[in-house]
Every structure is written in C-alpha cells, then in structure tokens.
Amino acid sequence: MDLMNAVSALPGVGPALPYIAFGVAVCAALATTLKPPAAPGWYSILYGLVNFVALNFGHAKNATAPAGSGVDPAKTGVLGALIGLALALNACTAPAPSAILSDMATAVDGLAAVLPSIVAADPSLAPKLQPLIDQLPAVQADLKTLQASASVAPGAGTLAQIDAWLNGTVKVAASIPAIPAPYDQVLQAASVLLPVIEAEINPVITRATGLSAVGPSAMSADEARAILLRAGR
C-alpha cells in the first residue's frame, strides 16, 4: 500500500496532514532556539503561538539533554522539520486519488463512446475493436467501484486491469492505418492522455510501462481531456 495515497484518502483532513506535520516540525525546531519573552508584546504572542503549534506545552523541559546522551535538541528539531518537509513535498508531487480516477474515467468514457461508432462506420475493423468493446462493461464497473471508494491504494490490481485495457485500445488504434473521422481525433487524444495516466498510477501499481503517445502530436494533455470529455457526453 502506498502510504501517501492511504493518508490522502482519510476523509476531510487527509490531504492536509503532511502540511500540518511540516508546520509542527518547523515550530518544534524553532522552540528549541527561541528565548522566553521578557515582557508582554508581539514577541510573547509569537513565542506562545510557536510553542502551541509545536505541542511544546511543557516549555521544552527536555531542552537540556542528560549528560553524555549526545542529544542536541536543536539538531533534533531541525531533523524533524526536514522530515515534515519531505512529507509535504511528497504530498505536492503525488497525485490525489480523485485526479487519477478522473483522468481514467475521462479516457474510458471517451473511448467507450466512439469504439462502437468506429465499427459501425467501418465494419472491417470489428475483428480488432470488438474484443475491446466486449470488455468495456467490466472495465467501467471496476472504475465505478474505485470511484465509490474514493481511494486507489487498495485497488492497485484493479487499476492495473483498467490500465491494461487502455493500453490495449491505444495499441490497437495505432495498428489501424486509417480510422474514420472524427473518431481518429478521440483516439489520438487517448494516446496523449495515457502517458499522463501512466505517470499518475505508476507509484500505486509500482511498475513502469514506458508508454508514449502514439504518433507525433502537438496536442496537450488538457486538450486531450477536453476532446475525450466531449466524446463521452
């Protein structure tokens, strides 16, 4: 299980926890160096706020380590701040479960809308596309299950299955010399968005596919999302 995904899935406070940990760690480091206020004023307010956030209700009773322990409270506080910073940065870089599932749903729904239309426009493509169309109900059901749980950490296997279907669809599309318009643009959009999805889910399913967009394209990921969303409506 990916720790950051599990933390971010906690209702309400999950996404903010790494930042809270960072704030507590920074204030704990400051509390080891701040001198007590000599008189009431703005410094005494700041001093009280820092100690409150640092959970330093005992006013650093252990600020002086026992002789021979080798513990430096200031260095320990700085280490705590660095750990909190690492958690916060990880939270910034790791995509939220909602973003992962949103991109997957955009790609699946867009492709689900056009694949039958492609076969209807060119029945000769049925041998290649019909197996993918037949798998769609199971793929969409798996995606709805993940969306209902609002978490991707417990569903790594399901994510991998949906990812495999998306990969298969894009690869089959790449093998077709001419896809009828306007469906070709939707499949191109899927090939542009898929590497983004791969980058989002690889930390969860702990593997890399090395997939890249099919064919040259100046289309951005946001443009690809817009095309797929229009197709899926």
Image: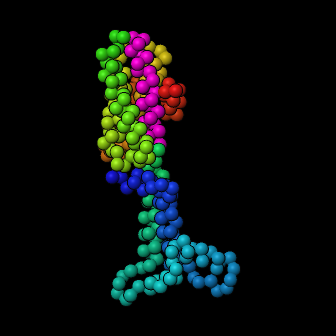
Q: Main secondary structure of the magenta part?
A: helix
Q: Residue at x 46, y 37 (%)?
A: 103
Is residue 90 in view from this perspective? no
Magenta-drawn stretch contains 6: no
In this rendering, the answer to whether 160 lies above or below 129 is: below
Q: Residue at x 42, y 31 (%)?
A: 108
In the foreground, 154 or 137: 137
Q: Give the magenta-colored segment's residue range.
A: 99-122
Name the residue nearer the viewer: 115 or 21.
Answer: 115
Name the residue at the right extreme. Answer: 41
Q: Quadrant of residue 130?
A: top left
Residue 17 percent coordinates (x, y): 48, 60
Whether residue 114 can be seen here: yes
In the image, residue 92 sits, relative to residue 67, either above or below, namely above
Rendering coords of residue 13 (x, y %): 50, 58
Look at 42% across and 56% down and name the residue there: 7
Q: Is residue 63 above or below residue 168?
A: below
Residue lying at 49% horizontally and 17% vertically, measured from the top left: 182
